[in-house]
C-alpha cells in the first residue's frame, strides 16, 4: 500500500479512537502493523497526529477554554478571586499536567521503544478495560467539576500519565479515575479532554520539532528514516482532527445516556485477540 493512503487510514484511526476510552496509540500501533509497510508508525507519528485531534478539542470546547483562560489571567492580576470555579479549574489543569510531563521526560526512551510492545498493549487493554467497567459500576457519579479539589486533580494527573503506555487510553485512564472518585460520566469526560490539551500539544510540538530537526529516528540499531514524509503526516493530522471533532460530539452525547460497557467489552475482546495472535506468532510483539 502506498504510504500516503496508509497515512490517511492511520489519520482516520487516530480521529476515531483518540476520544473513546479504547486507546488511540494502541490502535495506531496495531493498524500500523496490519497495513502498508507493516511497521510500527512510531511514537512521533502518534504524537504529531494528536495535534489534529487536540485542535478538535479546542474548537469543541472553545467557549469553555476562553472563559477559563480569561478568568485565570484576571485572577492572576487580582481582578477575580482565586475561589472562582473557572480559576480553580485553570490551576487544576496546570497541576494535572505536571505528572505526564515529568514522567514523559524521565521515561521517554522506554515510551518510544519498550512500552510499545504489543504484549504490553494487549495486557493494558484488558486490565484497564476491567478497571473502567468496575469504575462505571461502583462510582457514585454525583460529583460535578465545581467539586474538583487539589487531591482529586493530582489523581486525575497521574491517571492521565498512565496513558504514556499504549493501551491504557488517555481518556480511559482519566475517566476511570474520575468515576472511581465519584464524578459523573460527562464531568469526568469533559475534564479528561480539557486536561489533555497542554500535555498533547506540548508532546506533539516537541515531536514535530524533533522530526524537522532530525529526519531520522534514534533506535537501538542506529538511525532509520521515518516511515511517513512530513506531507503525509500533515494529511493524517488534518484527517484526525476532522474525524475527532465528530467523535467528541458523539461521545459526549452518548455518555450522557449510556454506560461504558460497550467500550469495556471491545477492550477485552481486542486484548484477547491480540494475545492469541502474539502467542501463535501471527504478529510480532515489536
Image (cartoon, helix red, strand yellow):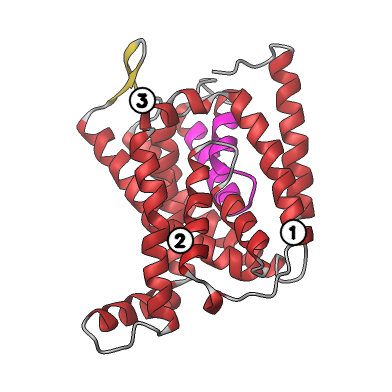
Picture layout, residue 109 above or below residue 266: above
Labels 2 and 3: the sequence-earlier one: 2
**Apparent side of residue 155 relative to residue 284 in the rendered image (left or right):** left
> In the rendered image, which residue does mark 1 sit on?
136
Please give the name of the residue rendered at 51% of the width and 32% of the height, measured from the top-left corner. 6
| Disc 2: CA contacts within 10 A as few (<14), some (14-19) or many (>=20) | many
Q: Is residue 281 magenta?
A: no
Instruction: Judge the density around disc 3: few (<14), some (14-19), many (≥20) Cα neighbours within 10 Å.
Output: some
Q: Secondary structure at mark 2?
A: helix
How far apart in space, not on screen, are marks 2 and 3 (Cα)? 30 Å
Provide residue 132's location: percent of width, then percent of height: 70, 51
For mark 2, what is the residue?
A: 195
Q: Is residue 9 magenta?
A: yes
Q: Which mark is residue 19?
A: none
Tell me the residue that label 3 is attached to: 226
Image coords of residue 72 (percent x, y): 32, 77
Instruction: Choose top left, top right, bottom left or bottom right for residue 229.
Output: top left
Identify the magenta region. Answer: 5-31
Name the outermost residue toward the front.
151
Q: Looking at the image, do the residues carrying marks 3 and 1 touch, with CB atoms under 8 Å apart?
A: no
Which of the two marks, 3 or 1, is nearer to us in this view?
1
Amino acid at each position: 500500500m502506498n504510504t500516503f493512503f496508509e497515512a490517511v487510514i492511520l489519520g482516520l484511526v487516530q480521529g476515531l479512537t483518540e476520544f473513546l476510552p479504547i486507546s488511540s496509540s494502541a490502535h495506531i500501533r496495531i493498524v500500523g502493523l496490519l497495513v502498508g509497510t507493516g511497521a510500527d508508525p512510531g511514537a512521533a507519528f502518534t504524537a504529531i497526529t494528536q495535534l489534529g485531534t487536540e485542535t478538535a478539542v479546542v474548537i469543541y470546547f472553545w467557549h469553555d477554554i476562553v472563559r477559563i483562560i480569561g478568568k485565570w489571567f484576571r485572577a492572576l492580576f487580582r481582578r477575580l478571586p482565586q475561589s472562582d470555579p473557572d480559576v480553580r479549574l485553570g490551576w487544576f489543569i496546570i497541576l494535572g499536567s505536571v505528572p505526564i510531563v515529568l514522567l514523559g521526560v524521565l521515561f521517554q526512551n522506554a515510551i518510544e521503544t519498550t512500552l510499545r510492545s504489543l504484549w504490553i498493549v494487549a495486557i493494558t487493554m484488558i486490565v484497564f478495560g476491567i478497571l473502567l467497567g468496575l469504575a462505571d459500576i461502583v462510582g457514585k457519579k454525583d460529583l460535578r467539576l465545581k467539586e474538583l479539589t487539589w487531591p482529586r486533580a493530582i489523581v486525575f494527573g497521574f491517571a492521565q500519565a498512565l496513558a504514556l503506555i499504549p493501551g491504557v487510553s488517555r481518556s480511559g485512564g482519566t475517566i476511570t479515575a474520575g468515576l472511581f472518585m465519584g464524578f459523573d460520566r460527562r464531568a469526568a469526560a469533559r475534564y479528561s479532554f480539557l486536561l489533555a490539551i497542554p500535555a498533547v500539544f506540548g508532546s506533539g510540538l516537541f515531536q514535530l520539532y524533533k522530526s524537522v530537526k532530525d529526519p531520522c529516528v534514534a533506535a537501538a540499531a542506529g538511525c532509520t528514516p521515518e516511515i511517513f514524509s512530513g506531507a503525509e503526516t500533515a494529511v493524517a493530522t488534518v484527517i484526525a482532527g476532522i474525524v475527532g471533532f465528530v467523535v467528541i460530539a458523539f461521545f459526549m452525547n452518548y455518555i450522557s445516556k449510556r454506560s461504558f460497557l460497550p467500550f469495556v467489552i471491545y477492550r477485552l475482546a481486542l486484548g484477547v485477540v491480540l494475545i492469541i495472535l502474539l502467542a501463535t506468532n501471527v504478529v510480532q510483539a515489536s
